[in-house]
Amino acid sequence: MRWLVVKLVNLVIVLVVVTFIVAAIFTGPLAERERSQIYTTVQQSIRERFKNVPIMAIYQDCIARGGMAAFDSSVDNVTQSLIQSSNKTESLQGLPEDTREAVIRAVGEAYKQVVHEATKSGSKLGDAQLYAEVTSRAMAILSEQGVSVDKKVVSAFVKNDFTPAIVDKCRNIIIKEEVRRKIHQKGLDKPWYVLSLRYTKMLLKFTPMRATSLTTQYYPTQGDKNVLHIIEERIPFSVSLFTTSSILTLLIAMPLALVAARRPGNVVDNVITGWSVFSVSMPWWWLAMVFIYLFTVKYHIFPNPIEVKPNWGAAFELGKIITGTPEQRAEVLHGLKTIMIAAALPVFTVTILSIGDTAYRIRNILLDVFNEDFVTVARAKGVPEHIVLRRHVLRPAAPPLVTIVLFSIVLSVFSGAIITELIFNWYGLGRLYWEAIGRNDIPVILELTYITTLLYLVIRFLLDILYTLLDPRIRRA
């Protein structure tokens, strides 16, 4: 029992460390994405909230968040900007340059006076009253300077040119402060290693993340951005393709490997060796396209993957086969048929290209055991060949064979070969990975990487346990 606890502790430690490394790689893009989402949400919320409120309320909120100095700075910036850009002061068009500048400065000064006094007294000026107060103060300042301007011109400038610019400045200050507050509240202003620990915890607890652009198409509902749901939707199709191919590969490869190992150098052995070299040496994507040409275009054995339009949603409506109407049952069955038709060629291709290498690896494992002294002794004693095979060959070879079987079948659930699925237009995890990379959807990439890593470590843990059960030497050690 002690060794099992030690193995489990090692698994947890390795999982945490590897998850932290994976999270650290994506911490920068993830944190930046969250900050961007906060900014977008706050910007929409603030603009919606201040859509029909008095202008003075916006100013007072701005002062409450950024201080009076921030408001005065905004007024000064707007004043200088309007002085330098005559095209922003339509209400003052036609005035001499010095008069235009004097009006702008007077309105800026008047604005600060009116807002300061209203803030100190706590009065809530309406928009019309605010315009009138600022215009009146500006006219007084201009009168003291000896500048003569029509009051209607100044009033129009205050209402149409100066005020909208101040409102935008104040709104930006409010947005900036609110974003800063929310970022601090969520801890997104912490150092990278603190953020990496946060994302590590989220991954270990399978905390739902939201995808940036990818969504579900069928399961559980269309348009769901939950990353786990997006991945769950693609798993059945990767299983139907790669797990099926892995099982077929093992069922064919293991007998071939056994025949080749029992008689090295025979026809089967030579075929397996050549098959393995060929399948490993040639690019799979190229062979897949050759198979598509041969079996769909030239000989019409399989349907063309481009022309087949599988009803992927049928895989999530299996309950209708029992509870649905005859029409619904027929529709689901037809959808499953289209999926099976689309899977025929890719399953055939992956299986054919995998048999050679898998059989060659199993053949080498068995051949090493066949050459052991205890097998020779058993044969010399006259032990029947089937007993030699079962007791003296397969049992010592069981650990590496189990490794091949587990990794081939279990990891095939999340293997999702990218190029293979793209070539065959298959709706699996490999294609999802490609879509996530193309759209820079970091949460989907991160979650897929983490789940694959977790699955690999769990398999290694299970293999350690199986090795102990299968090999007495390991158990005694």
Image (cartoon, rainbow, N blue to C red):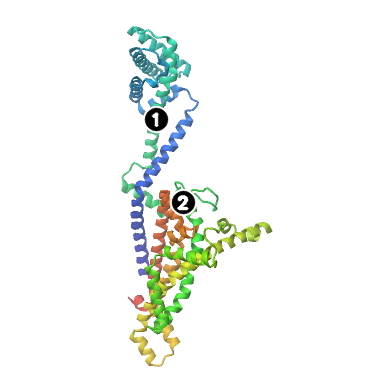
- Position in image of residue 92 (x %, y %): 40, 15
Above-or-below relation of 79 to 471: above
> How busy is the neighbourhood of tag 2: few (under 14 within 10 Å), some, or many (20 plus)?
many
As rendered, which of 35 and 251 lies closer to the eye? 251
Element under disc 1:
helix
As rendered, which of 96 and 160 lies closer to the eye? 96
- The residue to which callout 2 is attached is 227
Residue type, numbered disc 1: Asn
- Image position of 466 (left or right of 300): left
Element under disc 2:
helix
**Disc 1 to disc 2, C-alpha distance:** 33 Å
- Position in image of residue 37 (x %, y %): 42, 41
- Position in image of residue 215 (x %, y %): 49, 49
- Image position of 430 (left or right of 67): right
Please tell me the numbered disc located at residue 172. 1
> How busy is the neighbourhood of tag 1: few (under 14 within 10 Å), some, or many (20 plus)?
some
Q: Residue at x 41, y 11 (%)?
A: 136
Q: Residue at x 51, y 51 (%)?
A: 216
> In the rendered view of the protein, which quadrant contains the C terminus?
bottom left
Residue type, numbered disc 2: Val
